[in-house]
Image: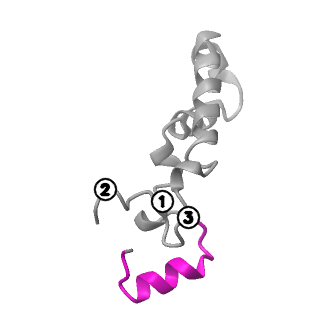
Amino acid sequence: MSNLLKHIAYCGLYCGLCSARNRISKQASDLHKTMKNEGYEFWATEVPNFNEFWKFLSSSCNPDNCCPGCRDGGGPPFCGIRKCAQNRDIEI
């Protein structure tokens, strides 16, 4: 698959406009940066489940960790367009 198609869903939507790939990762990155500047990674480790939250937040900062796009196994699991295209080996 060409890099041009990587972030175009089978339905034609551009994955770069999706909140999971764009807005959520930016917000997670901003929150992570703020919490890091405040020293949360050092003093909040005693807060219940903080380590799991910190790991989740850290991984959410990268849009490729949030959703790889429907062509790489992401996207809504109920999408009939993707299922149909994959069953027919359609790439465009």
Q: Is residue 66 above or below residue 54?
A: below
Binning the other alpha carbons within 10 Å of mark 1 as few (below 14), some (14 to 19) or many (20 upward) gives many
Q: Position of residue 54 (x, y in %)?
A: 59, 31
Color encoding of the figure: one colour
Image-quadrant location for residue 80: bottom right
Q: Give the alpha-carbon distance from disc 1 to disc 3, as whole Å.
A: 6 Å
Which residue is disc 1 drawn over?
69
Q: In the image, what residue occupies the spot 61% across and 68% down?
A: 76
In-front residue for pair 18/64: 18
Q: Are marks 1 and 3 in contact (CB under 8 Å)?
A: yes
Which residue is disc 3 drawn over?
75
Magenta residues, start to end: 76-91
Which residue is disc 2 drawn over?
3
**Which mark is nearer the camera, 3 or 2?**
2
In-front residue for pair 81/49: 81
Binning the other alpha carbons within 10 Å of mark 3 as few (below 14), some (14 to 19) or many (20 upward) gives some
Mark 3 falls on what kind of element? loop
Label 1 is placed on what type of residue? Gly
Label 2 is placed on what type of residue? Asn
In-front residue for pair 49/67: 67
